[in-house]
Amino acid sequence: MRGLERLTLFRLAEIAGRHSGASLETIQYALAECETGEALLPEVLSRVNVCSEWELMRLVSMEFGLPILRASQYETGKDLLNVVPREFLFRTLLVPLDRFAGVITVAMPVFSPGEVLDQAAQQFSSEIFPVVGSFTDNRKTLEESLKAAPSREPAGAAPTSEQDWTRLFDLADAGVQEEAKQPGVRGASSSRRATRPVDRSR
C-alpha cells in the first residue's frame, strides 16, 4: 500500500496533542516512553489521558482515511497468525485478518508506523492493507488465538473467497457506523465507505 511513509509516531503525537490540547512536555514524555519498547505510543497516550483509545482510533481513521475494524469483529484465521513468529506479533500487536489476491489486511493497534508495516509486509511476503484496530482487542485476540497454537507454520495459505473479502469490508463499515454512535464523538462521517485494496496481480 502506498503512503505508509506518512504513518509516523511524530505525526500521531502531533494529531493527538493538537486534538487534546496536551502540553508539549506530556507529548514528549509519551514519545520517550514508547521508545523504550515497553509500550506502544497509542497505549501511552491513552494511559497519560491525552486521548482515550476510542478517540485515538477515530482520529487515526479520519486523518489517514483508513476504516475502523476491531479484531474481535472478525474471525481471524490461525493460518495467517502462524505465518510469522509470535514475537513479532506480540511486539507490534498487529493482527492479520484476511488474505485476498496477495494482499493481507491487518488490524493495527490503533496505529502502527510505516516502518513496522513494511516489516510486516516482509514477514508475510505480501502487500499490507492496514485498518484501524484496538490495542486492547488485538492483544486479547493474540493471547487467545496463540496460547495453544504452534509457534510457526509454513506460509502459503490459499487466498480467501470474494465473499469473505466482502464480509471483511462490511464489518469495517459497521465499525464506522459504531463510531458515529459513540457519545460525545463529533465530526465522524457515518457514510464513509471502506476502500478495497486494488488487485495489481491482474
Image (cartoon, helix red, strand yellow):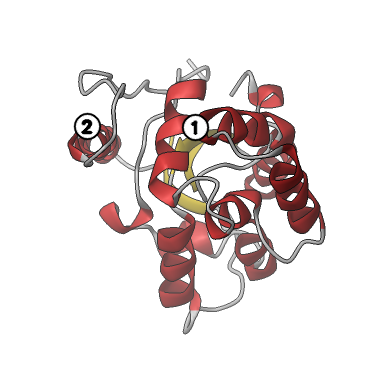
Height in image: 156 above or below 12?
below
Q: Label 1: how many residues lie within 10 Å, few (<14), some (14-19) or many (20+)?
A: many
Residue at position x 24%, y 31% from top? 173
Height in image: 179 above or below 45?
above
Q: Is residue 157 visible?
A: no
Q: How many marks?
A: 2
**Residue under numbered circle 2:** 180
Answer whether labels 1 and 2 touch (C-beta < 8 Å): no
Q: How far apart, in angstroms, are the residues tagged by discs 1 and 2? A: 15 Å
Q: Amino acid at mark 2?
A: Ala
Residue at position x 26%, y 41% from top? 164
Secondary structure category for the residue under label 1: helix
Label annotation for residue 99: none
Residue at position x 70%, y 47% from top? 26
Q: Residue furthest bottom?
A: 148
**Residue under numbered circle 1:** 60
Q: Is residue 172 visible?
A: yes
| Percent x, y of residue 12 | 63, 34
- Residue 17 position by quadrant: top right
Which mark sits nearer the N-terminus, 1 or 2?
1
| Percent x, y of residue 90 | 61, 66
The quarter in which the N terminus is drawn is: top right
Q: Nearer the viewer, residue 155 or 142?
A: 142
Q: Amino acid at mark 1?
A: Val
**Left or right side of 59 for 40:** right
Q: Label 2: how many residues lie within 10 Å, few (<14), some (14-19) or many (20+)?
A: some
